Amino acid sequence: MKLPSLIQRTITGLLLVALMIWAILSGPYTFVIFFAILTFGILWEYFTLINVSRECHILRPVHSFGGMVLFVCAFLAASHITPTSIFIVYLIYMMLMFISRLYTRQVNPLRELAFIIMGQVYIAGPMSLLSFIAFHTKAFPMDDMWKDYCPIFILSLFFFIWINDTGAYLTGMSCSKLMRTHKLFPRVSPKKTWEGLIGGVVFAMILGLLLSYGGYVWRHLGISLHEGVRLSRLSWIGMALTVSIFSTFGDLIESFVKRAVGVKDSGHILPGHGGLWDRFDSLLMAAPAMLIFLIVNAIFFK
């Protein structure tokens, strides 16, 4: 039974990774389409869990679409296709959301409103920041969206998350066979250990060091380095450390929410993996942390 499940999980994971890398490398349009749909899907799963918990009944299509609108607005603003006033579209959605609570028949409309806002802040907000990472370059703006678009940081973000998860798993498993491990946060995630956290951080920092030497790899992939070549090796390592730590927090927060509503998986759309939220939970904390790091690094380490 385990072998077919492992094969299914592996195939699903490889296909998802390949699709994501293709979407990022193919340019800004495939980037925005892929991640806009992903934002909608994660929000859909989140609102589904809230509805299952019977805390309230949220209109999933409306508010999942609202989060996708925020992502598209952020992309249009970050790429300079439109001015930042494009966020007025999302602002209208938010205003209508509040006004509509006056007419709702929910038993506790404030609780419903709180869950909706949490979805927008916790999921749609961080996902929208991916566009500002993709267009984060000192040469910005160059008045050419295709030249402004720099996938190196987006790819690095996911590389750091994946290597952190792999390193944490391998280190945690190895240490559990050799010695008594120490639980990281047993109330939320009993399987995570301090040893695994440290292992994931070390793996990510090593990858950060390798990427700082890997200019020829990026060029071979046809990626314009932009600001990436201006980052020092210490900055690459620091970025890896930042993503590694906050991706772990992202995983813990999703586990916290799922425990609160009493479910194991956020969905079943990915065979062997569960839902989209299960696969991208780390991203929701890692993306804001990485953008903050890039901004601070650009200010203080020019």
Image (tube, helix red, strand yellow):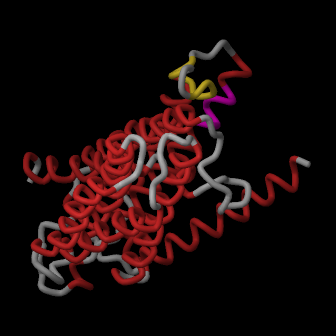
Residue 220: quadrant of the picture = bottom left
Q: Quadrant of the C terminus?
A: bottom left
Instruction: Answer left or right for 264 relative to 199.
Output: right
Q: Which residue shows up at 12% across the image and 85% down it?
A: 143
Q: Residue 87: image x %, image y %?
A: 17, 69
Q: Which residues are magenta?
A: 168-174
Nearer to us in this view, 99 or 259 = 99
Residue 126 lies, in percent from the top left, at: 32, 54
Q: Residue 157, relative to residue 25: is it above or below?
A: above
**Residue at 50% of width from left, 60% of height from top?**
44
Q: Is residue 157 magenta?
A: no
- Answer above or below: position of 119 versus 256: below
User: Quick check: 170 above or below 218?
Assistant: above
Q: Is residue 222 left or right of residue 11?
A: left
Predominant SS along the magenta part: helix
Residue 22 location in percent, x, y?
A: 50, 77
